[in-house]
Image (cartoon, rainbow, N blue to C red):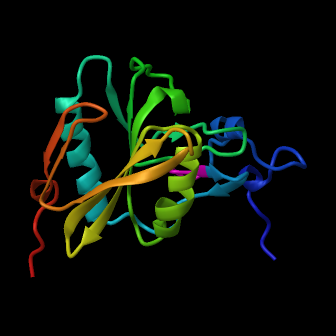
Amino acid sequence: MTALPDWMLPPRPEGWFAEDLDHLPDAPRHTELIDGALVFMMSPQRSWHGRLVTALTVALTAQAPDGSEVDREMTIRLDARNRPEPDLVVTNVPYNPDRTWYAPDDVQLVIEVVSPESAHRDRTVKLRKYAEAGIPHYWCIEDEDGAPVVHVYELDEPTRSYAPAGIFRASLRRPVPFEISLDLQKLVPSRHV
């Protein structure tokens, strides 16, 4: 049996906590904490995913009003045992170069771009956890034959669950969390056969 690297051993008998992620210098990039368990991407990221996240970052940054920031691949400390890392977050806090995570109250919009290995977490687990934490807007973006399809959700405050607010193909126009207009067809290159 192969011994685990030291960084994979929980620092206490109760397991992992949100603050532990800041003390794992040898952990792989994109390490998340879900229900006290470390989760990290083991498969290589697809070019489609990377291009889409980059294009969305640029487009949303250009449209964001003063006081809103767009950040990618930053964790959100939902509670003591959950610190997921969405692909993009739109926040209402000033840029801080030393920041390693956001609080749910700081987040206006979370965007997850679905990958084969993250599909279940993005579509169910994270959707529920972000809503329970009170994050007002959630987008889950799927690959439909090479084109991005955006599933938009808004928080229903009384139930702390998301209500579907639309499925967008080709273009997306939303008034919240700020006025957003996207040509989805231009976010990734078309497939070449």
**Left or right relative to 113: residue 5:** right
Residue drawn at x 39%, y 20% as measured from the top left: 95
Q: Position of residue 165 (x, y in %)?
A: 32, 52
Whether residue 100 is visible to the viewer of this picture, yes or no, is no
- Magenta-drawn stretch contains 180: no
Q: Is residue 99 above or below residue 109?
A: above
- Seen from the viewer's position, the closer of residues 73 and 35 is 35
Whether residue 193 is visible to the viewer of this picture, yes or no, is yes
Q: Position of residue 126 (x, y in %)?
A: 53, 54
Report the residue that reaches farthest toward the front. 158
Report the residue that reaches farthest toward the right. 13
Q: Position of residue 5 (x, y in %)?
A: 73, 57
Residue drawn at x 20%, y 47% as measured from the top left: 55
**Image: magenta residue range:** 28-32
- Seen from the viewer's position, the closer of residues 53 and 184 is 184
- Magenta-drawn stretch contains 30: yes
Residue drawn at x 26%, y 41% as measured from the top left: 57
**Left or right relative to 32: residue 123:** left
Q: Position of residue 40 (x, y in %)?
A: 57, 58
- Seen from the viewer's position, the closer of residues 1 and 125 is 125
Quadrant into which the N terminus falls: bottom right
In the picture, residue 52 is in which quadrant? bottom left
Prevalent SS, magenta region: loop
Quadrant into which the C terminus falls: bottom left
Q: Is residue 188 above or below residue 175?
A: below
Residue drawn at x 28%, y 35% as measured from the top left: 176
In the picture, residue 140 is in which quadrant? bottom left
Q: How many marks?
A: 0
**Left or right relative to 63: residue 130:** right
